[in-house]
Image: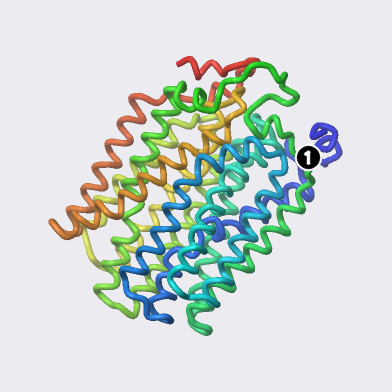
Amino acid sequence: MRQQAAQNQPLANGLPTGTVQVGLDALNFFLSDVRDGLGPYLAVYLLAVHHWDQASTGLVLSIAGIAGLVAQTPGGALVDALRAKRALIAVAAIMVAGVCLVIPLFPGFWPVAAAQVASGAASAVFPPAIAAVTLGLFGHAAFTRRTGRNEAWNHAGNAFAAAAAGGLSLWYGPIAVFVLLGAMALASVVSVLMIPAGAIDNDVARGLESGAARGEKASAWKALLGCRPLLVFAGCVALFHFANAAMLPLVGQKLAQQDLNRGTAMLSMCIVGAQIVMVPMAMLVGARADAWGRKRLFLVGFAVLALRGVLYTLSDDPWWLLAVQAMDGVGAGLFGALFPVIVADLTKGTGHFNVSLGAVATAQGIGASVSNAAAGFVVVQAGYDTAFLALAGLATLGGLLFWWLMPETAARTAAPAPAKLAPVLAT
């Protein structure tokens, strides 16, 4: 039983320490880059090393995104249903490591496309699985604190990976990214095995109370479609990423137009700078979201995102663009840490935490996917400044909808969970 195993763990401020904390820290650090796949690094590799045309390169990148989008909700349902959550994370990480081996060995279109499907599907498993393991280890009362710590380690890992990829590629070329990603994937397997399987309460990991009665439960579809705040949250999440996803690529294009040789280096600095800012933001959520509430912090994220879109139009100086992009660390840092916490609040007692997390992540992916295409169209028709202002307007709209329609969820965690549906499902 998880309770007996947890009692054997030393505690600090009510939280497990020792191998549980270290293993979860390491898992979030090493999976940070693995969960996002090769991304833009694959485009550089295929274009520079194998001389693919831009159409084929863009197509295989889209394949990974579509595969991940399709797999989000089923991946969450799988995490809810499967008790062997550590094994699921390990298998998904090994799949990503395999992709890093297949693509350099078989750089043809169809092998790369198949590898991208596998990578996208595997990446969809990581967010709900990590959230489930965290909830199963720490319970609802400490979930916010531990999720903030998870995200802090995640952003630290992203900053490390971006810096290491940039540095290693100068010496060894684009192939170095594959080696780095494969090594981090294998290190994440070791990390997850450091977490004792018996310390994870699988009922709590699904959003139930520990040892909950196996009576009638809401179906997954009822948990998703019958909870109005969850639907509102999904819509606001989609708007957030519609406004946010295209900003960094547009900044990269502006930097590349000014100096092609420095463009890639400056883009890496944008990524690293934002990730560094995200670390204290995630820690802030972990420390204060229970006391201050989730809503006001999430609204700050929307406000900073809208401000960023406006500030981009004031100057094309590379260092100005770099400074404004660092503000992404505030909005995205708050969002990343609050996202699983709010879903956990809304689904407490339903047993469908992870499928709900996957469904809202699907809305997030749809918003991000539409963002780049829509912003690119606006740039062609009206220029970069108009595109940035349009994205800022979407962020403002999302913030207003969140303010008007979304309830504060922090107080819900203190209420006892019912035997059947959480009260919020009747809202």
Q: Nearer the viewer, residue 302 or 424?
A: 424
Rendering coords of residue 279 (x, y %): 53, 52
Which residue does the numbered mark 1 point to in the structure image? 199
Rendering coords of residue 53 (x, y %): 32, 75
Residue depicted at x 46% and y 37%: 360
Residue depicted at x 71% and y 50%: 87
Quarter of the picture containing the C terminus is top left
Please tell me in which quadrant of the rendered image residue 56 appears.
bottom left
Q: Is residue 110 left or right of residue 138?
A: left
Rendering coords of residue 212 (x, y %): 72, 22
Relative to 250, is 212 above or below? above
Task: Give the colouring mode of the picture.
Answer: rainbow
Furthest-bottom residue in this view: 171
Relative to 20, is 95 above or below? below
Density class for disc 1 (Cα within 10 Å; few <14, some 14-19, many ≥20) is: many
Residue depicted at x 30% and y 62%: 251
Identify the element where label 1 is drawn. helix
Rendering coords of residue 47 (x, y %): 38, 76
What amino acid is labelled 1 in the image? Answer: Ala
Please tell me in which quadrant of the rendered image residue 373 appears.
bottom left
